[in-house]
Image: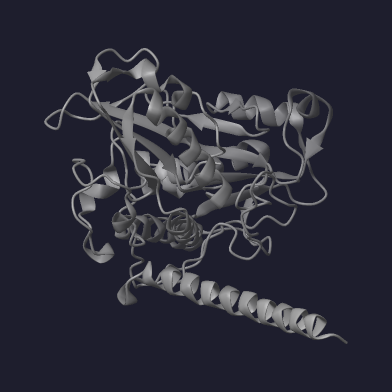
Amino acid sequence: MSSLQIGLIIAGILLVIGVIAYNRWQERRLTRKLRAMRAPDAAPAPLATARALDRVEPTLGTDDTRYASERHPSDSAPAFRAAPVAESAVAMPDVAQSVVDVAPVDVVTSPLAPARVAAASGAKSETEPDHEIECIIRLQPASPVPAGAVGAGLHARVGKSLRWFGRADARSDWRRLSSDTPGLFSDVIACMLLADRNGAASRAQIESFTRIVADIAPTLPAAFSPPDIERETARAESLDRLCADLDVQIGITLQKPDPGSIAGTRLRGVAEASGFRLAPGGRFELVQEDTGVVQYTVQNLRPDPFTVESLRLTATNGVVFVLDVARLADPVRVFDQMKLAAKRMAVTLGAELVDDNRRVLDDAAFASIRGQVEEAADALRAVHIEPGSARALALFTA
């Protein structure tokens, strides 16, 4: 073997060792960053979710939601789906420090300790940026521009919600931009939601968002500083874990005693008489007329979604009343209403309200469930996610 061959072999070995060492260094560096995203006293406490036992990891690029079985309760759907909430508060991840080049922006002041964020931050308006749950990139045009100048960004799609805001000057309020928003704007910021019920924003989605803004910047023209992709990805994953722990849905099962069943036509008539409407997702929804907010739903106890045709031709052995805690401004009050509606429907249909073991729910059981609704709502407020707020609706949407 020649000296050249020996030298090449040694060089190859050294290269492999170098690559392994670099990869390990990168892994340790990422681990340290992930740990640094939470203060020592801000680790999330355990909280039972609507699907704590069968939760699957978020998958991107598919139609799966964070809870794969959430769309269609199984035949063994429990009467209620929340366990006692842990007493210790869960803190919002330390995301304020990750805002990209937005120091002069009114909504981003100074880095905040997670446990000391003002409670008002949980009630962010839909008409202002939310730096704690969004990746934010700022553009400062050389001269004021109309909203149409960022038209390509307004219609962009990356798999997560995008919002654009502008303001005339530093003393003006932020305005949500659309293609027909009047006026000129000397400050523009682009926002991408970091997590929802489909999971955390992926690195690829954050990179796509950054490219969209980068392509628009020179057309204004405007100064542009890209975000730290790695840090934003870590923020998204941390936020998604927090939301998964806080995502609670409460169900009350209405079931016909064996071997009975409920005819679909009968069920539809009773549901519609009670104010429900059949939604495209295959469930009955009770919608508040003034706001258009879904208060609670009635889903098939079997895995099949309801359709006009299936209700006409088939029967079911029961249904599940479902309340989505995070999406309601007053979930305890709505639970009380849902309980009464379920009791009335049970009487009308000759059915029973039961638990997992098909034991009839009594007043003590309903009181316990009501307490869990209240605890779940309090857990959201403890991390500055006001139930029913714009922040909650954004985070807890599939």
Rendered location of residue 258, percent (x, y): 80, 52
Left/right of residue 269 with respect to residue 88 in the rendered view: right
Foreground residue among 262 and 216: 216
48 to 152, vertically: above or below: below
User: Where is residue 27, by image quadrant?
Assistant: bottom right
The answer to whether 3 is drawn above or below residue 123 in the figure is: below
Residue 342 visible in the snapshot: yes
Q: Which of 150 and 296 is in front in this view?
A: 150
Evaluate whether residue 45 shows in this view. no
Along the line of sight, the residue nearer the viewer: 124 or 327: 124
Task: Indicate the position of residue 301 as horizontal and vertical percent values.
Answer: 71, 46
Q: Is 356 above or below relative to 64?
A: below
Quadrant where the C terminus sits is: top right
In the shown orientation, is residue 109 left or right of residue 165? Answer: left
Q: Position of residue 187 (x, y in %)?
A: 25, 30
The residue drawn where x is 28% and y is 19% is 145
